[in-house]
Image: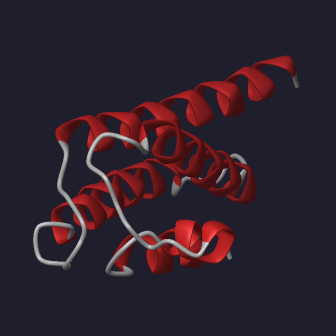
Amino acid sequence: MWFLFIFVVSIYPGNLIGLILKGDPTTYPGGDKLSHFVSYFFLGLLAFLSIGKNRKFKSIVIFLILFSLLMEVLHLYIPSRFYENLDLVMNFLGLIVGLFLFKLKDLKN
């Protein structure tokens, strides 16, 4: 479900969350770094928790990285959206922190 949420929010031509919460779909470059980090942190954490110690772990990591990259590249073509390298960095950082916490939990067991 979280994956679908991120997909829909990412391909919406404008700020869907802003539209729902404030009635304003206007997007501004540079103002959404924390939301990128949090969204991909939870995406990574939920994905990693759902697979457990499965051998597909590496495939899931690669898929999430490619998904993050694709969502950001699509912003080049979606009206009122902006491609930003720092958004991509925050996506990757969120995934890495989620992975780290998953591994930390795994070490304790």
Q: Is residue 101 above or below residue 4?
A: above
Q: The N terminus is located in which quarter?
A: bottom right
Where is residue 80 drawn, in percent x and y?
Answer: 23, 72
In which image quadrant can residue 107 be found?
top right
Q: Residue at x 32, y 80 (%)?
A: 13
Instruction: Where is residue 64? Give x, y as percent.
Output: 41, 56
* Residue 90: quadrant of the picture: top left
For the rendered model, the colour scheme is secondary structure
In front of the other: 73 or 64: 73
Residue 28, horizontal then vertical, whole percent: 31, 53
- Please give the count of numbered marks on the rendered protein: 0
User: Observer-nearest residue: 77 or 52?
Assistant: 77
The image quadrant where one finds the C terminus is top right
Q: Is residue 77 above or below residue 29?
A: below
Picture quarter containing residue 23? bottom right
**Residue sitting at x 76%, y 29%:** 106
Image check: 29 left or right of 22? left
Specify the farthest residue to the right. Answer: 109
- Which residue appears farthest toward the left when viewing the image? 76
Along the line of sight, the residue nearer the viewer: 67 or 31: 31
Between residue 50 and residue 75, name the one nearer to us: 75
Q: Position of residue 43 (x, y in %)?
A: 59, 55
Residue visible at 69% across and 46% down in the picture? 53
Residue at coordinates 11% horizontally, 67% vertically from top-left? Answer: 76
